[in-house]
Amino acid sequence: MNGFELEPGEFVVRLLRKHWLLLLGEMLPYVILAVIPFALPQLLSFAPVPANIHFISYLDYRQSESHHALTIWLLIIWTVAWGNFTRYFLNAWILTNQRIIHIKQRRFFSREVSSLFLSRVQDVTSDVSGVLSSIINIGTIKVQSAGEEEEFTMSGISKPEMMRDLILKYIPEEKETGV
């Protein structure tokens, strides 16, 4: 399973990724860059005639050199956009009944998996900042633990208050010791 094993009696409560609107925002520049070569000849047709005649002849995509350049341009954009989507899809937070697991895909062949046992959690805070974040209810959850890693942060989470309450629900209550 994605670089981690569940303990006996442990089950997955919720799998989280960043909100899909954040992915759209990250992919928008690639869409714009892919459309530019097709829109540029039409936009240049509005320029004064002496300025655009020479440049438009280079943008004839039926010519072999222009066709190859366009193909390479689109291939580079597709590769970078696909890498961005892959990181979005593979980066995840998994809440189980015993711990929070963060899977972070750094590069194509570099993954980091860290976990935080819920028994070590001291504080869970949710934060929604900004007008747009408040409207679409996207925020950050910070989980503080008693361990070496001071804060476990989940950014771009949908409905952070609900997730905070879900984490708090699974934090084990301390058993009182008889003195």
Image (cartoon, grey):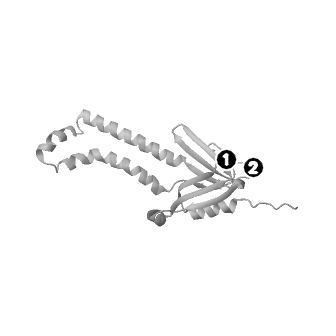
* Circles 2, 1 touching at the beta carbon (< 8 Å): no
Name the residue at 80% across, 60% down: 175
Q: Nearer the viewer, mark 2 or mark 1?
A: 1
Rendered image quadrant of residue 97: bottom right
Q: Residue shown at 59%/42% (left/top)?
A: 112
Query: 29 left or right of 102?
Result: left
Q: Position of residue 136 (x, y in %)?
A: 47, 64
Q: Is residue 50 above or below residue 119?
A: above
- Count residues near mark 2 (Cα–Cα under 10 Å), then give few for <14, some for 14-19, many for 20+: few
| Mark 2 residue element | loop
Q: Measure the alpha-carbon separation of dots 2 and 1.
A: 25 Å
Residue nearer the viewer, 174 or 14: 174
Badge number at residue 65? none
* Quadrant housing the C terminus: bottom right
Q: Residue at x 16, y 44 (%)?
A: 52
Q: Quadrant of residue 124?
A: bottom right
Q: Is residue 78 left or right of residue 114?
A: left
| Front residue of 27 and 137 | 137
Sequence-wise first label, 2 or 1: 2
Picture disc at residue 8? 2
Amino acid type at circle 2 is Pro
Residue designated by label 1: 148
Name the residue type under label 1.
Glu
Farthest left residue? 50
Compared across the picture, whether 69 is left or right of 145 comes to: left
Residue at x-position 60% and y-position 49%: 102
User: Residue 94's x, y, as percent?
Assistant: 62, 52
The quadrant holding residue 123 is bottom right
Mark 1 element type: loop
Q: Position of residue 118 (x, y in %)?
A: 69, 55
